[in-house]
Every structure is written in structure tokens, then in C-alpha cells.
Image: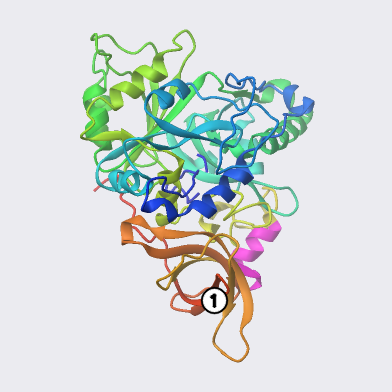
Amino acid sequence: MSSVRILSRGVDLATTRVALHTPRAAIGSTLLRRELSSAATVRPTTSRALRSNAPLAAPASRSAPRAVRFASTTSEPLSQTQLYDLHVERGAKMVPFAGFDMPLVYADMSHVESHLWTREKASLFDVSHMVQHHLSGPGAAELLKKITPSSVDKLAPNTSTLSCLLEEGTGGMVDDCVITRRTEDTFYFVTNAGRRTEDLEFLTAEIEAYQSKHGLDSIKWDILSDRALVALQGPLAASVLQPLINTANTPSSETDLSTLYFGNCRELYLTLPDGSASAHPLLISRTGYTGEDGFEISIPTSGAPDLPKQVTELLLADSSKSRLAGLAARDSLRLEAGMCLYGHDISTAQTPPAAALGWVVGRDRRDVATATFNGASTIISQIASPKTIPQRRVGLTVEKGPPAREGATVVDISDPTNIVEVGVVTSGLPSPSLDGTNIAMAYVKQGLHKKGTELGVKVRNKVRKATVGGMPWVESKFHRPQ
């Protein structure tokens, strides 16, 4: 989750921006094609990764790829999530995304309608294309402290943090991820589908290097390919999920979702229509990628292949509260919430401080003399002296007219006789929640990142005024202790 903001924000990570129904079809269509195109192809996993303790058992693939507009074609067959058939049954428009056939929008609602529904009620997103990992052993925390800047050893059991995998030497972000500590030496974390190959290669190399020093038993790593993952997001999410929690043989303090706060998780059973408990407990994390209250639910399928569909149908039983939503709404929601999309707003070209994500670096990990994580000297130096960072990620509000899309040039308009290029837009669209106000993320030259700075964005060969502002554009509504 996919897909980033941080667990003071909570997460998640995915994505697109288009409406398929007129008159809304113009909203985001060009950028959506770009995003799907860039994420559509996943290279085969290298043999090195397959030799690791994390063999990749991908979901079933079809014999030939679909020809879908909105994305580039690929010779690689597309994988399907465990809920693919349900998406087709529900009238989803399927498109290639990160090597999977994924729902963009559904027949019952346009992109904008689905987006607003999520803000007002609850939407269910299939994010089973994301990669779920299990890391355990006496060296698990130490390894995570090397490859991420987070204070994972300070996390309480069943507590999460948004983090990022860091490139050795440069401190560039290999991927963003959410890490959950389950027990003293057991961790669950989720990485982006579009970075599957790169992440597996990175993790394999780091784990093998650690094991060579500390022994094969120091770390055990598994890809949880037998699990589906769905995200229930929106102000009604808790009211949808709470009645489904099976309360038999479980203390009420555990089954009461009002005591499950943002960034925490529990394993709970659901009650099926026949009154029985689900075949497995579900890992329910209070987090998401929309800025709304909600849950990400990891669903085991071992011995119960129908469980993902059973759970999904339960969550969608009351259509006045919850409905399916696809990539289009997911992308516009995450942008309004100021959350980054990997490969667009963040990449190995940026360190966390350059991406305005310096807060992912644990406060106890900012001493350059003791920090051991990848790229520590560079990252800590940037936190201490932000003016040394050449470019900064900012939020822009752009004047009325055509929106600023990914790749649009940002210019300094302080001197009308000498307009100078100072940055580039990485994500942008008309905000459905703000009546179509044009919003965008961009990287701009150091010194021009302060709130209130007036800049320009080149849109269709015309310079449109833009103002640097705070993010998120839509206030987050995470469930926290009062």
C-alpha cells in the first residue's frame, strides 16, 4: 500500500485519476494513462530473489494479456488478485496496473462519485496486488534498523509505522512501506506491487548479507502470497465492520473497534452469514491511504480459498453504507490527503528529507555517530541543514483552468521579464472534494518551498499561477485516543 505519507499519518501507498462517464471523462484521463503505463509491467523476479527464504508464489496468471486502453501493452501475462472474478461480476473496468489486472472504476459509480462516496460513507478497495511480508528471528529488528530509518525496536506489539526502504550509500528511497511489529522479533510489512522485483532483489541482498554474518537462523523471511488484502475506508468504515466481528471466546476489549486506534492492529474473526466464525482470524489494521478513518484487512486463504470473497461480500452487504472503489478514486483520495505515490512523488532519487518525509527518521536515530541505517550520514545531514537539499516536495494550488499534470514545468514568476524553470509537477488533478480546485505535488528549488510562495506552472503552453500551500488539502480523520 501501496503506495505514502507516514504513520503519524498512517500510510499507504496506490492510484490513478480518471472518470469514465461523461461529462466527467476529462478529469485525470491523461495522467491516469501515464501512471498505469509506468506501473503496468513487472519484470520477472531474478533467480537470486527466488533463492531467498521468500519464494514468490504469484497469484494465477492468464495466458494472454488484455488489450486495455489507459495503459501500455506488455508481453507479460497479467496476474489476478483473489477477487478478480468478483470485480468482473460487479461491472469493474479492468486495467493493467503493476502487472495485475485491476479495477479502475465500477459500473455503478463514476470516479468522482466513488471518490465522494468514500469521503462521506465507506468504500472497499482491493489491494491484494501489494506485497505482504513476514520477517522473524533474533536479527529481524536489527535488519530493519539497517534498511529503514525507523525506530522499529521502539514499536509496541501490534503497532505500525510508515517507513521506507533505503538504498545503501545514497539514502534514496527504494520503496515506501508500512511496518507492523507483531511480537518481540516478528514483523509484518507491506510494500508496493510496482516495486515487487526491485524490492525482492534489495531485500534478498540485505538478508543474505546479514545471514552470512549472523547465521541462516538469524532471520526468516516469507512472502505471504496466500493472503488477500482489502482496505475499507471512510467515515462509516467502523460501523460497517463492527457488527461483523465475531465475539465468541474473545474479550470485549479486543472485539470493540472503538479501542483499536490508528496505527494499531488485531487478529479477529468475522461472523459468516450462517453464524459460524471465519476459517481464519483476519489481521485488521487501522490505517489506510485515503486520509479517512478505515482499516486494511489481511485475509489468509490457506485451506479457505473462498474467504476473501466471503469477507468482501460481508463488507458490501449494506450498499447504503459501503461500495467497491477502484484505482481512480484511490489516487485522487491519496493526493488530497497529501500522500505520495512511489515512482511519481518519491523514488531512489529522493531521500526522506528531500521528499518532506524526514519525520520517518526516528528521533533516536539522528545521531550520525551512532546511526547505522543505509544513507544515514546524508539523511541526518539534510535533517540538520535543510538548506543543503537542492529541491523540496511541496503542495501547489493552481488557478482555475486545465489542471497541472505530472511532468508540467514549475517556474519562478517573480520577474515577469525572466521566467525561470524551478521545478516539476509529480502528481496533479482537479480535487473532487474541493469542487474541482486544481491541486498538485511538485519538487521545487530550495528556498521556493515556503507556504505562500507564488509560482507558475506551464499548462498547455500557458503559465498558470500556483501557490505553495500545506498538505493535506483535505484534513485527515484518523481514529486516535481522545
x and y percentages locating residue 393 in the rendered image: 55, 64
Quadrant in the rendering for residue 58: top right
Identity of the amino acid at label 1? Answer: Lys
Q: Is residue 383 left or right of residue 399?
A: right
Task: Considering the whole magenta stretch, tell me its main secondary structure.
Answer: helix
Above or below 268: residue 328:
below
**Front-lying residue, 286 or 77:** 77
Element under label 1?
A: strand
Question: Can residue 56 be seen from the camera position used here?
Answer: yes
The residue depicted at 59 percent of the width and 54 percent of the height is 346
Question: Can residue 340 be seen from the camera position used here?
Answer: no
x and y percentages locating residue 61 in the rendered image: 61, 21
Q: In this view, does 321 lie to the left or right of 383?
A: left
Density class for disc 1 (Cα within 10 Å; few <14, some 14-19, many ≥20) is few
The residue under label 1 is 462
Q: Residue furthest front?
A: 22
31 drawn magenta: no
The residue depicted at 42 percent of the width and 65 percent of the height is 438
Quadrant in the rendering for residue 254: top left
Above or below 272: residue 442:
below
**Front-lying residue, 251 or 471:** 471
Above or below 449: residue 442:
above
Q: Which colour scheme is used?
A: rainbow
The residue depicted at 54 percent of the width and 87 percent of the height is 414
Magenta stretch, residue numbers? 377-391
Q: Is residue 29 left or right of residue 167?
A: left
x and y percentages locating residue 237 in the rendered image: 28, 36
**Front-lying residue, 375 or 71:** 71
x and y percentages locating residue 356 in the rendered image: 53, 61
